[in-house]
Image (spheres, rainbow, N blue to C red):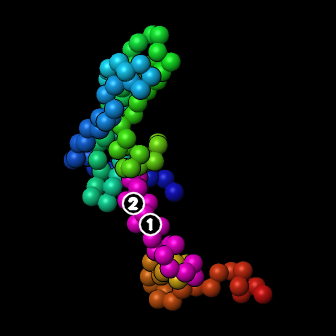
Amino acid sequence: MAKRKRRGDPTVQQVLDPLRTHCEGCGGRLWVAYANTRTVVTLDGPVHLTSKIRRCQTPTCALYHRPYRPEEEGGLALPHGEFGLDVIAWIGTPRFGQSAQWWIATTRLSLAPTTGEPEEPPWVSQK
Ligand SMILES: [Zn+2]
């Protein structure tokens, strides 16, 4: 199904910086080389994330130009993910916290509120 409405602009800005400031290969300072930005939808609303990426600038180092991303970034959302881990956990909790049949029945009720009763799947009535 195509997206019909544009999601609102994020009202929360969050800047993430790697905790590591020195290279573990040579001990030199890791400089901020560039920043990646993206919008992640959380349970509190859309958040504009800016991740500072650090790199070692010592050409003789074995880790030269290896990117160091903020550690916190992986706890907020999956790479290239549009939704935060809190949203994924919120969706997954009833799915895996209860039995699969309870989840299927609840989903059917929420998708078809006019019927009031969960419908049998078509493969059940064919038997
Ligand atoms: Zn280095």
Residue situated in front as seen by the camera: 23 or 116: 23
Q: Secondary structure at mark 1?
A: helix
Residue situated in front as seen by the camera: 65 or 99: 65
Q: In the image as oriented, which residue stretches furthest toward the right?
A: 127
Q: Position of residue 126 (x, y in %)?
A: 76, 85
Q: In the image as oriented, which residue stretches furthest toward the top?
A: 59
Q: Quadrant of residue 72?
A: top left
Disc 1/disc 2 C-alpha distance (Å): 6 Å
Q: Are marks 1 and 2 in contact (CB under 8 Å)?
A: yes
Q: Position of residue 61 (x, y in %)?
A: 46, 15
Q: In the image, which residues are magenta?
A: 83-101
Q: Quadrant of the C terminus?
A: bottom right
Q: Residue at x 36, y 37 (%)?
A: 70
Q: Quadrant of residue 122?
A: bottom right
Q: Position of residue 22 (x, y in %)?
A: 34, 25
Q: Name the residue that disc number 2 marks.
A: 87
Work out whether 10 lies above or below 1.
above
Q: Residue at x 58, y 85 (%)?
A: 119
Q: Amino acid at mark 2?
A: Val
Q: Residue at x 54, y 86 (%)?
A: 118
